[in-house]
Amino acid sequence: MRKTIITLCMMLAGMGVQAEVDPHFYIYLCFGQSNMEGNAQWESPADDVVDPRFQMLATTNFTNLQRTMGNWYTASCPIVSPTGKLGMSDYFGRTMVAALPQDTKVGVVAVAMGGSPIEMFDKDEYQQTLTENPDAWWATLSNMHYGGNPYGRLIEMAKKAQQVGVIKGILLHQGCSNCGDPNWPNKVKKIYQDMLTDLGLQAADVPLFVGETEQADMGGGCAGHNAVVAQIPTVIPTGHVVSSVGIPGNGDDAWHFSAAGYRTFGKRYAYEALKVLGLQAQKAADYTMPDNMKNLTTLKTLENPGDLQIRIGGSKALTIWGEFADGHRENLTNEVTFSSTDFTITNGVVSGTVAKKGVITVSYTDFMGTLHQMAVNVEVSDKGPNHVLVVDNGTAGSNPWDKQLHCTLTTPMTTGKTYVVKARIKADNPGDCALWPLWTASPERDDWNNSKAVQYEASYQLTSEFKEFTWEFNANYTIDRLQFAFGKIGGQVYFDDVTCEEKGGSTELVPNGGFESDNIADWAVIGYMGQTMTIGEFELTSEISRPRIRKAEATCYDLNGCAVKNPRKGLYIKDGKKVFIKD
């Protein structure tokens, strides 16, 4: 009977008749750029079956599926726009209806344009942004689908959705076009608050879910933006970050995920939303899963990372992967639980304080409700393997700046004081490695001629044997990042025992410079240049795979892979090549 009532309410709403609001119809607003619009071709039969309890409100007219703006439809692909494909919201909704009671429906109201800057969703800035960029692809999409006002269309359709259901949350995936912008969290906050005000909502009732950009080890060209995304909960108390760790890219560019990636990411958005609702990320007991969803969410096996060896005083981060019934793999590290009577595990990190052997139990309950467990053997010893940072450059570049390793210091240097940086480095192939300390907050950090942010220190020749190199210099700026530049070296470069101290001081500024911990969150390489990095056990022989170099999009990026709207004088990436802008 409830299904009949809900369907009737939707029909009446589509005819312009005021229908009764159904408290069991959960509405989620979705906005952003191409990853939210959907960038992967849906696949058959994997993406064919959609539960009709998952609905979409068309926010524009669809000619290919004959959908009319303002009407509700079963949310089969594409659900954001006629030019969109499989994206974030697809498996968000599919997962939600599988976990919620049978009398509950889920609807998405989505507005997104590929390449769109966040300013296009600011009701006070979109017009100027559109005027300044009339020929941009996202401007074309904005005019084509949303009358040039994406925010206005989203609010208009959201009000229509409020006639039949209750808005329960907002999903955002955007950042590549504002990569690294320190003001991005506050821009998002303004848009979020405007939405709440314009729709008469309270933040406590309508949380914001923000997805990370593609990670560097997955080939992401704007992984650095995730440090900005991480600030969302501190700026927006009802904001939640959805992890992109381990989610595969599409293999063709450095910004978009694969179809399998979108399925996983959509599930993660749903898991976070279910958690906020106080529910487990498991299917409802009385729900009959379609085969495609069952295969996607049924864990086949947990992949054992193998025995762990840790040096006394060091630590090791456990990374847990799982293979699912449909054959795809997922990084489950943030979803499993660790338990041990032998060791203390904090956020998946095992610390070795004394010599001992023991076992860690890894447990994971999949969406189908099945518990999976495995044991990991751990040995802590003073003779454990030496860990180093292995940077794989792939193909050698043409310039020193083509391949870099970055380290964010724990505390910025003090201008005028003398500092000493040391590092043990070697490379598979000979070549130069220079140190370029950087002040990241400087507006002139990308002005590579007489920059007021970068210091160009000595370059040393690397060989196949580890050598310790020393750089001593006075800090001309408030330096907060070390940049090692070795762009002309192909293959692997190895770093160990990296230190930075004020001369005569004893405070270490480099986090995990010995790499005995797997936590390298403060270290980064240039993903869009084909680089990857990982912790390696140097005494052991292992093959490290090289991902193919991603194609750069035809736009302007700084050397950190961040899109630049109005580039100043300096060096940039344009159409996959280095260009120097003089004026």
Image (cartoon, rainbow, N blue to C red):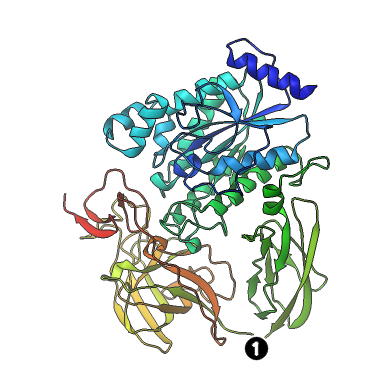
Residue at 40% from the left image edge and 32% from the top image edge: 120
* Residue 464 in the image: above or below residue 111: below
Amino acid type indicated by mark 1: Lys
- Is residue 413 at least partly visible in the picture? no
Outermost top residue = 17
* Residue 498 in the image: above or below residue 94: below
Q: For numbered disc 1, what is the local secondary structure?
A: loop
| Residue that carries the numbered disc 1 in the rendered image | 383
| Near-viewer residue (419 or 386) | 386
| Near-viewer residue (568 or 482) | 568
- Left or right: where 569 falls relative to 282: left
* Residue 147 in the image: above or below residue 64: above
- Image coords of residue 118 (percent x, y): 42, 37
Residue at 70% from the left image edge and 63% from the top image edge: 346
* Residue 471 in the image: above or below residue 336: below
Screen quadrant of the N terminus: top right
- Image coords of residue 51 (percent x, y): 68, 36
Residue at 37% from the left image edge and 33% from the top image edge: 141
Residue at 32% from the left image edge and 54% from the top image edge: 558
- Left or right: where 437 falls relative to 108: left
- Image coords of residue 331 (percent x, y): 63, 61
- Is residue 492 at least partly visible in the picture? yes
